[in-house]
Image (cartoon, grey):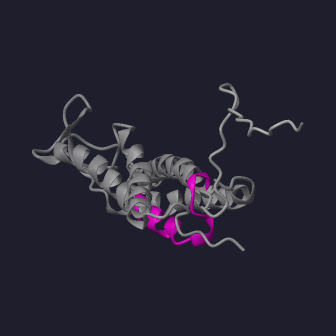
């Protein structure tokens, strides 16, 4: 007498992880970190050096403030000249946003290095560039408007452009992230169109 063979049902263990791997389905691209570290460092340092050019440009184009010397030696701005305090900051911020947009677009053109590693490096480099532009821009502006002799009462002096707030530093990183993020959203590919060799 033979024993009848019955198919044995095997049920997966409830605690075992279920694999959803399908061999014919494309795998999502992974973030490349190690290969992008050296290019990211180059991007960071190059963008930071661009702050020198933006600072020089701002020091040449930012408006001065005309002020008159009064009896006790104080400087009083002429009428409507105090508006230039805002103009200096607005011009610096606009330069930063424009430089940030150009930075984001240029960074997107590095097709082989698209991704979060290079974007973070560009963000840090943009912040450093904006800080550097502010420091050297103020120094170069002060150097252009040096008073050689003691002014007399009634003299009108051109005061160097100045930045009374540090919030203008945020323009460059903001422009970089918005431009790069817009291009990445417009691309719509999982790998952002990278072509790694």
In-image side of 111 versus 155 (left or right): right
Quarter containing the N terminus: top right
Check if residue 83 falls in the magenta segment.
Answer: no
Q: Magenta part of the protein: which range?
A: 100-117
Which secondary structure class fits the magenta region best? Answer: helix
Residue 168 appearing in the image: yes
Residue at horizontal 38 percent and vertical 59 percent from the top:
182
Instruction: In this rendered view, identify the residue nearer to me: 188 or 101.
Output: 188
**Which image quarter: residue 74?**
top left
Residue closest to the far right: 1
Instruction: In this rendered view, identify the residue nearer to me: 26 or 68.
Output: 26
Residue at horizontal 18 percent and vertical 41 percent from the top:
77
Instruction: In this rendered view, identify the residue nearer to me: 75 or 15.
Output: 15
Residue at horizontal 35 percent and vertical 45 percent from the top:
162
Residue closest to the far top: 15
Residue 46 rendering spot, x and y as whole percentages = 61, 62
Quarter containing the C terminus: bottom right
Check if residue 104 falls in the magenta segment.
Answer: yes
Instruction: In this rendered view, identify the residue nearer to me: 20 or 1.
Output: 1
Residue 93 rendering spot, x and y as whole percentages = 33, 51
Residue 24 rendering spot, x and y as whole percentages = 63, 64
Residue 57 appearing in the image: no
Q: Is residue 149 above or below residue 6?
A: below
Residue 61 rendering spot, x and y as whole percentages = 32, 62
């Amino acid at each position: 007498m033979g024993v009848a063979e019955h198919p044995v049902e095997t049920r997966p263990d409830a605690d075992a992880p279920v694999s959803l791997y399908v061999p014919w389905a494309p795998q999502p691209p992974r973030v490349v970190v190690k290969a992008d570290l050296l290019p990211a460092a180059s991007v960071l340092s190059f963008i930071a050096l661009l702050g020198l050019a933006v600072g020089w440009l701002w020091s040449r184009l930012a408006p001065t403030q005309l002020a008159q010397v009064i009896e006790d030696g104080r400087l009083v701005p002429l009428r409507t000249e105090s508006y230039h305090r805002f103009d200096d900051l607005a011009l610096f911020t606009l330069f930063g946003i424009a430089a940030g947009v150009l930075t984001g677009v240029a960074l997107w053109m590095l097709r082989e290095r698209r991704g979060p590693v290079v974007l973070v490096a560009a963000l840090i480099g943009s912040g450093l560039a904006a800080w550097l532009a502010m420091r050297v821009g103020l120094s170069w502006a002060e150097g252009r408007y040096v008073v050689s002799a003691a002014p007399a009462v009634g003299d009108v002096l051109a005061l160097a452009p100045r930045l009374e707030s540090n919030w203008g530093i945020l323009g460059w990183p903001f422009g970089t992230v918005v431009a790069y993020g817009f291009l990445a959203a417009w691309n719509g590919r999982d790998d952002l169109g990278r072509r790694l060799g």
